[in-house]
Amino acid sequence: MSEAPKSLNFIEHIIEEDLEKGFPKAKLRFRFPPEPNGYLHIGHASSICLNFGLGLRYDSPVNLRFDDTNPVKEEQEFVDAIKQDVEWLGYKWNTERYASDYFQELYDWAEMLIQNGRAYVDSQSSEEMANQKGTPTEPGTNSPFRERSVEENLELFRAMKNGDFKEGTHVLRAKIDMSSSNMLMRDPIMYRILHKAHHRTNTDWCIYPMYDWTHGESDYIEQVSHSLCTLEFLPHRELYNWFLDQVYDNEKVKPKQREFARRNLSHTVVSKRKLLRLVEDGVVNGWDDPRMPTISGLRRRGYTPDSIKSFADTIGIAKRENLIDVSLLEFHVREHLNRIAPRVMGVLDPIKVVITNYPEASEEWLNAENNPSDESAGSREVPFSREIYIERNDFKEEANRKFFRLKLGGEVRLKNAYIIKAESCTKDDNGNITEIQCTYDPKSKSGSGTEESLRKVKGTLHWVSVKHAVEAEIRVYDRLFLDESPDTHKDKDFMEFVNPDSLNVIKGFLEPSLKSSKVGDIVQFQRLGYFCVDPDSSDEKLVFNKTVGLRDTWSKIQQKN
Ligand code: ATP
Ligand code: MG
């Protein structure tokens, strides 16, 4: 398929400009820098596609860098999950790096800053320091410890490192400008004491560097040329550059921080911290619950890397935040699954149909194409017999002319099988229909070439032979939140908007070819939607997740606008 050349996004424009000004293409380098404090979500997919996409476009290395400077929240489990997700999306990193690999180098540079009079140990409480911060319009106040001698600072900083002090007693601060109009430049903290074991460095360190001090220097160590982050870091750019200037050597590449807008998806939250609450409060069954907007949740739900990447590609990157409707993501999923998913039949809300003129002892196996629009997908056999299930809502005793499904006296075609006619139905004491009696036209078998087989009737229904049906648990999902933007309400916690009915577990009856399905298999239940086999499936019990329905809600939204 040939595609029109895509126009450059604004980050690519910045890079192109740098190349035009003489920056050597061979020195382009990127990184994707997750903090291992949770699982990746669909927002991260945008950043992954951006950074790794640049790597592919310019044939440049992209590192996977774990920003692991906060041992309190970070875990190996998250590192492993992040690696799995990036790989699953189909990207290859150049090297796997950890900010914690640079703890010694960062420490040595911090001592150098002290020696250059650019950093000092502050021994005030965090409240005292906060009180001196000033406001955006009023300058801050210098700490009484700001003028400590180099010797005293070095001695204290080394003692901090050696574990001589309790948490909260001292910090190392950069000595910049307490009256800067950028509050972040008002002597930011570089190190704090934390007597916590780190998932990689264990108890080697009891002081940990802050994000701002770590991030730019890590980019510098890795010689990242363009360090791309989300917009909330725009005011940090000045500090990023200040820290780089302290260690910068003219021979090397000075990384350039540039910002793009965070991607938000409707009816969910994209923040690891908030997703963690959903997990911890038991609203979902773990990070990979198919209702979660995590990469692992989407994978379990049946989303494919292709669909996630084409979604990320379509929304591109932006300079301003906005809300992306989740139906656009579903559109891309549907489009990909339409191309790859075999068609099968399953009935999720069954009502029994007895074909009274079909011999009781008979059964036959009918040929069914796996994908009518793709011959190479092959075909399979589905069993037909006297008793079948159809969907309850595919039958009405009486209906107007626009009802193309089954009604008393009316005909429909059973997919890949025969034309049947509804003759009568049976009801229970409450008036609920319990069984439909039909007759079939033996000459109307699909694909048999007879005149009757070519006869057109308005409706075609999916069905499953009762005695051959395989029972399965089907998990049908709804939006996780009832509000389209649950975490933007000033006076309400996002958890108040959780949809109490986001999971509906039902029993389905499937054609027997599905018996041998494997975890992760994706199929289209004809007329119902796309479904995939959940890891909870076993030989004894099949479990399917509904990935997405067939109806395209996105186009409808577009037409309305
Ligand atoms: P969270 O609040 O979910 O923890 P984060 O930004 O703190 O998000 P990081 O692990 O630091 O998460 O993110 C790694 C990279 O992914 C960063 O460059 C970050 O800017 C980017 N990123 C995170 N969330 C989004 C999003 N919603 N849209 C685009 N990029 C994102
Ligand atoms: Mg973070």
Image (cartoon, rainbow, N blue to C red):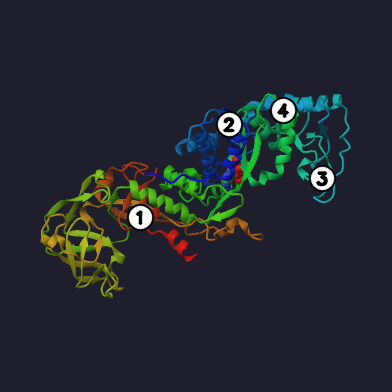
Which residue is labeled 1 in the image?
529
Q: CA distance from mark 3 to mark 1?
A: 57 Å
Mark pair 3, 2: CA separation: 38 Å
Q: Mark 2: give few (<14), some (14-19) or many (20+) Cα within 10 Å.
A: many
Of the numbered discs 3 and 2, the one sitting upstream in the chain is 2
Could you tell me residue 561's position as x and y percent? 50, 64
- Please say whether residue 265 is visible from this viewpoint: yes
In this view, the residue in front, 325 or 429, is: 325
Query: Residue 477: image x %, image y %?
Result: 43, 55
- Give the residue type that dot 2 points to: Leu
Three-letter code for the amino acid on which mark 3 is drawn: Lys
Query: Which of the two discs, 2 and 1, labels the residue nearer the N terminus?
Result: 2
Mark 4 CB near ligand 1 (8 Å cut): no
Instruction: Provide the residue designation for mark 3.
Output: 133
| Mark-to-mark CA distance, 3 and 4 | 28 Å
Q: Which residue is mark 2?
A: 28
For the point 66% across and 61% down, the residue is: 491
Check contact, mark 2 vs mark 4: CB within 8 A.
Answer: no
